[in-house]
Amino acid sequence: MQTRVSTSTKTVNPPRVSRHTSCDYAAKTRGGPFSSSYGQSPSLIWKRGQQPSELSNDNIVLPNVGDVKILIISREAVVGPEIVVDGAILSNHAIVVEQGMIQAVVSVQDLAHDISIRNVGPGFLTAGLIDIHTHGAGGHSFSEGDSEASQIALTTMLRAGITTVLPTLESGPIEKLTKGLLAFDALDPKVATPRLPGAHLEGPYFSQQQRGAQDPDALRDPSDGSVSRLLELSDKIRMMSFAPELPGAVELTRRLCSLGIIAAAGHSDGRDEDLLACQREGLSHVIHIYSGQSSTIRIGPWRRPGMLEATLASEDLTVEMIGDGKHLPTTLMKLAYRCLGERLSLVSDSTPGAGIPDGSNYRMGERQFLVENGVGVTMDRSAFAGSTTLLSQMIPITMQALQITLPEVIAMATTAPAKAARLERVGRISEGYHADFALFDRQLNVQAVALGGVWQ
């Protein structure tokens, strides 16, 4: 059980910076299968005491954009806000950024006198947030299989401080899922989007009894031969979630793990032994705890634990929790956090309903849903249909519900999902990591975001 921690904010000296070493995971393509360049023009910041003519070629790059030359500082110190780093909050510190990567976190007074300074104002600066389970936003879903729709959803997320995303496709016909995967290749490289290490396929191998808002007509067993068609695009898939009790689930786990794809359990009506059988073959993750999970049943006098109890009792599974304050009451959120601690990731499970008002309808696949009381519901109001809250908006909700510190809740949306999805060089403010940042004000509203050192 997690030890109760103080809710006080602490200010400490910067941690000793150690050189980043790569994880021993089965690594995916660096930057992800959908990686692209970013076309925003950052503002030029002069070095203290210098005129533009004095800038050296060591500190700027001069790309041509039509007839316009854009000056980009390649090394600068980001100052102003307090910095949330590795379980602490640092005051009067700076992040040294060079060529889009973090070089160091140092005291402001220790900065070189000639370094360029970018003051982003007051507030809290965190690592860019990571959402490993999100279906869309701004009225658009990734399952539309349309690059323009995906672009709108992704830019909505980037503006909200989410700098790495596993775009999530819900259950649907195999042809529609493959179309959705291929649509990310057509994203406009001139428009900034979050980093896309690969997609999360949520389905179609789920239990009818625990399907939630998944399309019942699209559900199937992994033993039916359709897996091979999806895995023809394995280089575009980062995670696949499925019900461990279904025929062929153990073999599916083996195949996914051999390809470096995270095997995850979800929408399952199985027992604890079903989850354990897939864990032995490499399953490492469980999606949205409490949602679409079986729990203990009795057969005669004997109690049989379900997916929920097996998840809470696990010693090494990484687990998701939807922190919108709608899907789960505070008591259940606290129970999950106390059992799972740093293995618990916040996810939005956001839908096209994120960012549109109450009373609006939205579509996912062939089904229509409703935004009501700040959450997505099925039209008959019998089940939730994902959230309408973006990940950054869940930070203050979860912090209040769990009564934890800001560094602890930020870790749930950065380092924890990075570990769960086996992502390198994102999710921390540390030497050797990408300069992806979210700037929050004192009320924990996102004010600005940086991706690879470029402020959006």
Image (cartoon, grey):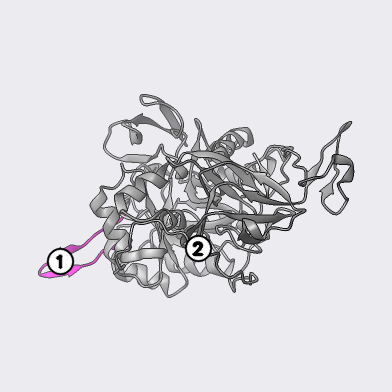
Magenta-colored span: 293-307
**Residue denoted by label 2:** 86
Q: Nearer the viewer, mark 1 or mark 2?
A: 2
Counting from the top left corner in percent of width and height, residue 417 is at: 49, 58
Residue nearest the viewer, comparing 428 with 382:
428
Counting from the top left corner in percent of width and height, residue 429 is at: 58, 58
The answer to whether 182 appears left or right of 177 in the picture is right
**Residue denoted by label 1:** 299
Counting from the top left corner in percent of width and height, residue 143 is at: 52, 40
> Which residue is drawn at the image coordinates 88% and 45% (left, top)?
54
The answer to whether 229 appears left or right of 271 in the picture is right
Q: Quadrant of the N terminus?
A: bottom left
Instruction: Kindly identify the amino acid type of the residue bearing the numbered disc 2.
Output: Asp
- In the image as oriented, which residue stretches furthest toward the top? 359
For label 1, the crowd category at 10 Å Cα-Cα, with few meaning under 14, some 14 to 19 and many 20 or more, is few
Choose top left, top right, bottom left or bottom right for residue 183. Answer: top right
> Which residue is drawn at the image coordinates 40% and 25% (left, top)?
360
Disc 2 is placed on an element classified as: loop
**CA separation in Å, label 1 and label 2:** 47 Å
Question: Which mark sits nearer the N-terminus, 1 or 2?
Answer: 2
Counting from the top left corner in percent of width and height, residue 185 is at: 68, 44
> Which residue is drawn at the image coordinates 32% and 63% (left, top)?
5
The answer to whether 430 appears left or right of 123 in the picture is right
Please tell me whether residue 361 is drawn above or below residue 413 in the rendered image. Answer: above
Choose top left, top right, bottom left or bottom right for residue 248. Answer: bottom left
